[in-house]
Every structure is written in structure tokens, then in C-alpha cells.
Amino acid sequence: MFKIFPIQDEETKKIYAEACGASLVDGAFSYGMADAESLAIMGFSQFDLDGEEATLYDLKEKIGQSDFEAIFILGRATLEFCERCGATSCFAKKDAADETLLRAIGLRTERDGGFYGRIEGMFDGHCEGENKENT
């Protein structure tokens, strides 16, 4: 088991970013993922919100670790938070994460050297993230 949590202080953010091979983005939001028992670092996401668009800078596993399902859950938790804060779409550069992972979390359309997707309604229990009442 693992836990996902918002990182509130810059020192913890720096530790998680380094462990996962990410460069710090000043002022960005971040989530950490750690083993629930040992508290060992498992993953890191870093993102920003700008009105209705979120930007995903990093969705990374700890260097040397490979657990696709866990990092997928971190990615979806990150997108859900962005959507709850009012974002309707999300953009990520190709190097934000493995391309397969970016597509799996719902970013599919290629744009500006990265991936883009609508996240509005993605977590409402509707297929493909579309709210059928609004289509």
C-alpha cells in the first residue's frame, strides 16, 4: 500500500524531486507518493493551475523503481485535484512522464510538443470523461 499527499514544504519537495529525477518548478504544486508502512519515496508529481488549464510538469517514479499501476494512480489523483480546482483541461510536455503513462491517465491529443486532454467531468463516473448531459 501507499499514500499520496500534497507536499507543503520546499525541503520535502526538493527531496522527492531529486529522488524521482525531476527539476523543481518554483511555485508549482506537488504531490508525493510514499510506501504506507516504510514511508519510502515512490513517486512525485508537479503541476500548476492557470484558470481552466492545468500544466503537468512531472509525473515520475523514484529512480530505479517500476510500478506502473501506482504511478498511474498518482497521475489520476493529480488530475482529479486539478479538475476539482476548476481546470477543464491539462497539458503535459512529452518528458513529463512516459508517453504510455500520459496516454493512460487521459492525455491523448498531441499539442505543442506534448499531450493535452480535457479533464472536465473525467471523475464524474462517465465514460471517456464526458458528462453525457452536456454533450
Image (cartoon, grey):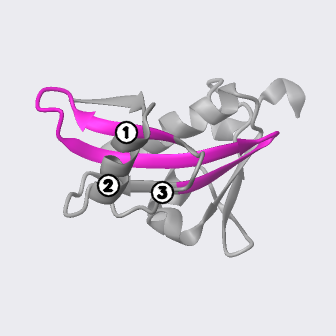
How many C-alpha atoms fall within 10 Å of the one at disc 3: few (<14), some, or many (≥20)?
A: some
The answer to whether residue 69 is seen in the rendering is no
Residue that appears at 74% across and 73% down: 112
3 and 1 marks in contact (CB < 8 Å): no
Residue that appears at 45% across and 53% down: 59
* Residue 97 image offset from top left, x and y in percent: 46, 62
Element at label 2: strand
* Residue 125 image offset from top left, x and y in percent: 62, 24
Question: In this figure, which residue is indicated by the disc labeled 2?
Answer: 61
Say whether residue 17 is left or right of residue 117. left
Question: In this figure, which residue is indicated by the disc labeled 3?
Answer: 24
Out of 117 and 83, give the one closest to the viewer. 83
Residue type beneath disc 3: Leu
Residue type beneath disc 1: Gly
Question: In this figure, which residue is indicated by the disc labeled 1?
Answer: 32
In this rendering, the answer to whether 36 lies above or below 119 is above
The answer to whether residue 40 is seen in the rendering is yes
Region rendered in magenta: 30-57
Residue that appears at 76% across and 30% down: 86
